[in-house]
Image (tube, rainbow, N blue to C red):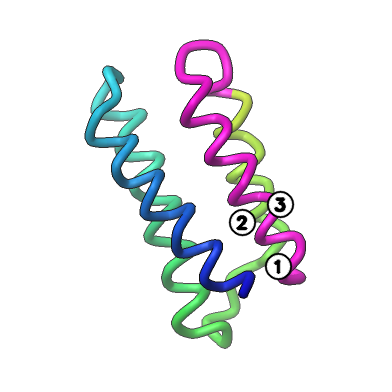
Amino acid sequence: MNRQQLIEHLDQLTSAIQDMQATDNDKEKLSQLIFDIEQQLSDPTLGRDNASLTEQVDGLVSNFETDHPAVAGILNNIMLTLSSMGV
């Protein structure tokens, strides 16, 4: 169930990126996060440090919470889901 929730949150984030008014750099950071998480889901043996993945999400929440609260909310949901999955 958590994996499906995470996929749904990633889909929401993808839609939000397309609709948001932000710099290309900000959109690229979010797109890179989606890519990193999807890679981790598809092949957990890649050796990605789970702590750095959670830190990456947490840092993005801080960056977007003021100007893009909806995106920050989606990122919070992603972080909670990753935590519940043990990532």
Gap between marks 1 and 2 measured at Cα: 8 Å
The disc placed on residue 37 is none
In reply to whether residue 85 is colored magenta, the answer given is yes
Q: Residue at x 50, y 76 (%)?
A: 41
Q: Residues within 10 Å of mark 3 (few under 14, many from 20)?
A: some
Sequence-wise, the earlier of marks 1 and 2 is: 2
Percent of width and height locating residue 65 = 57, 20
Residue marked by disc 1: 87
- Is residue 60 shown above or below 80? above
The disc placed on residue 53 is 2
Residue marked by disc 3: 80
Gap between marks 3 and 2 measured at Cα: 12 Å
Q: Tell me the SS state at disc 2.
A: helix
- Identified by mark 3, the residue type is Leu
Percent of width and height locating residue 81 = 66, 58
Magenta-drawn segment: 63-87
Between 17 and 54, the one lying in front of the other is 17
Q: Residues within 10 Å of mark 1 (few under 14, many from 20)?
A: some
Gap between marks 1 and 3 measured at Cα: 10 Å
Say left or right for 30 vs 75.
left
